[in-house]
Amino acid sequence: MEVSKSDWKLFRASIAEWQENYMERLVKEYIDLLKGEGNASDKFWNLEKRIKRDRKNPGVLIELRKSNVIYDIVSLINQGVISKDDLEGFSDDLKEKVNFIISKMR
C-alpha cells in the first residue's frame, strides 16, 4: 500500500521516539525481573530468553521501507509499542487503512 510523502516523513521522524519509549518500558520490566525472587541463574536465563524474544519486536528493530509503513504501524499497534493515539498528525487515509487492516485481523 502506497503512503504519501508526508506520512512517510512523519513515520521516519516518529519511529525513533516510539522505539525509545518502548525500550524504556522493556528496561523497566527487565529491572523488575532481576529484582524478583529466585536464584540469580534463573533470573539471568529468563532475562536472556526475554531479550532474545523482544529483539524480534518492531519496537526494538525495524527495517524502514516506505512500502511497509502501514503494515509496520499495524504491527507496532498490535505489539503494544504504540496506540492509535500516536497516529495524530498522520493522514486520514493512512489511519483508515490501518484501522481497516486491524479490524480484519480480529
Image (cartoon, rainbow, N blue to C red):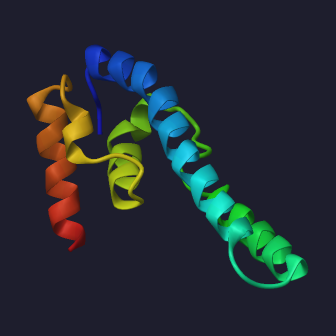
Q: Position of residue 4 (x, y in %)?
A: 26, 21
Please state, as top left, top right, bottom left or bottom right, where the C terminus lies in the image.
bottom left
Please state, as top left, top right, bottom left or bottom right, where the N terminus lies in the image.
top left
Please state if 50 lies on the left or on the right of 22 as rendered: right
Quadrant of res 12: top left
Please state if 22 lies on the left or on the right of 1 as rendered: right
How many numbered marks are there? Answer: 0
Q: Nearer the viewer, residue 72 or 81?
A: 81
Residue at the image position 18 percent from the left and 67 percent from the top: 104
Query: Does residue 36 sit above or below 18 in this rendering?
Result: below
Residue at the image position 18 percent from the left and 29 percent from the top: 88
Q: Nearer the viewer, residue 66 or 55?
A: 55
Q: Position of residue 63 (x, y in %)?
A: 58, 38
Q: Position of residue 84 (x, y in %)?
A: 21, 45
Residue at the image position 34 percent from the left and 19 percent from the top: 10
Query: Does residue 3 sit above or below 77 in this rendering?
Result: above
Query: Does residue 41 sit above or below 96 in this rendering?
Result: below
Residue 95 visible in the shown view: yes
Residue at the image position 54 percent from the left and 35 percent from the top: 20
Query: Does residue 6 sit above or below 104 in this rendering?
Result: above
Residue 59 visible in the shown view: no
Q: Nearer the viewer, residue 7 or 88?
A: 88
Q: Nearer the viewer, residue 42 or 103?
A: 42
Please state if 32 lies on the left or on the right of 42 as rendered: left
